[in-house]
Image (cartoon, grey):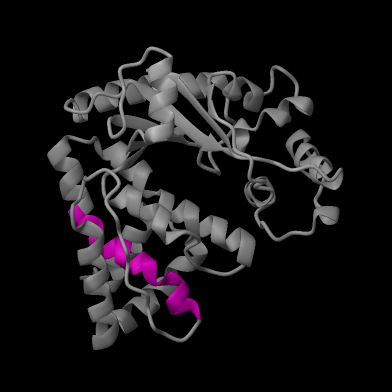
Amino acid sequence: MLPHADELAEVLLDLAVPHEDINQLVRMGRRVTDDPELLRVLEASVEELVRGMGEIGGAVDLPQLDWASGPLQRCFPVYVFVAALPYTRAYHRARGVPDDVSRRTLADLGRNMAVHRRRHRRAGVQAPWWLTHHFRGELYQLGRLQFERARHGQRTSRVLASAGLDVAPGTPCLNVHIPDYLGPLSPAACERSLALAAEFFTLHYPEEKYRAALCHSWLLDPQLKEYLSADSNIVRFQDRFRVAREDREPADSEPVQFVFGDPELAVESLPRRTAVERAVGDHLRAGRHWYIGHGWFPL
C-alpha cells in the first residue's frame, strides 16, 4: 500500500510536504505497514477515497483512526493520500491531464500541512476532507487559482437563469478557490488562470459544459471596499463577480483564519502590518462582522 522508505521520501517531496516533516513521516510509515490494525484502516480509507473516482460531489467518508492522539493520528491522512496516489495518477492519465497540472494540484497536500504547522506549530493535516477533491479528480490547480468541478444548486441556478444563462439545478459549474502561499492575487495571474481553465476543461472534460464560475469566499465580502483601494488585487478580484446571494450569518473566523493563520486569535491582539490585516482586525474591533460572499460570472 505504501512505498518503501527511500521512495516514500521522494513521493512526499513531490507532494510538497514540508521538508521538516519528511523524516518523521518516513519513520512512522514503517509503523503503519507493520501494524495489521493500521494497515486495515489504511486499506479501507483508500478504498473509500477512490470509489467513484472522477464523480462530481461524490460523498467520501474516510474512516476515523481510533488511535491515541499524537503525530500518527494527525498525519495518518498523509499515508491515505500517498497510498491512493497511483489511482489518482491513473485517472489523470486516462483524462490526458498534463503531468505539471497533476503535480501542482496534488501539491496542495503540502500546502495543507504548512497551514497546519502555521496554526499548531507541529506536523499534521489541516483539512483532510478538502484534499479528497484533489485526489478524486474533482479539483485542479491551473495557475494562481483552483477550479473544482461542481454542480449548480437550486438558488444559484435560479439567479443565473434569470440573468439569461441556460442552467438548471444539477448542471455543471466551476467553483473557484484561492489557495494560500502562492503569491499575489493579481489581475494578470487571474486572467491567465481563467484562460488555462477554459482550455483545460474543454480538452479534458468535453462532455461537461461549464457556463458559469462561482466563488464562495470572505474575499467577496463587499465591506472590504471600505478599507482597500479600488486598485487593490482583492477589490479587482471582487469586481469580476456578480452577486449570487447574500449571506446573513456572520463568518468572522474565516478572515481571521486565512489572514492570520488561527481562527481563535483574540481580536484585540490581531496585528496591523498590512492593509488587509488592518481591514480585518479594525472591522472586528469596531464590533462589526464579516460574511461569506457568493459571486458568479459567465464563462
Q: Which residues are magenta?
A: 70-87
Q: Is residue 256 magenta?
A: no
Q: Is residue 121 above or below residue 38?
A: above
Residue 144 visible in the shown view: no
Left or right: 131 with respect to 257?
A: left
Q: Is residue 73 magenta?
A: yes
Between 23 and 172, the one nearer to me in the picture:
172
Left or right: 175 with respect to 54?
A: right
Residue 191: horizontal and vertical position, in percent?
Answer: 47, 19
Residue 219: horizontal and vertical position, in percent?
Answer: 61, 34
Between 196 and 285, the one nearer to me in the picture:
285
Which of the 4 image quarters holds residue 96? top left
Residue 283 visible in the shown view: yes
Image quarter where the N terminus lies is bottom left
Residue 181: horizontal and vertical position, in percent?
Answer: 55, 43
Residue 13: horizontal and vertical position, in percent?
Answer: 38, 56
Q: Residue at x 59, y 24 (%)?
A: 238
Left or right: 266 with respect to 262?
A: right
Q: Residue at x 34, y 30 (%)?
A: 173
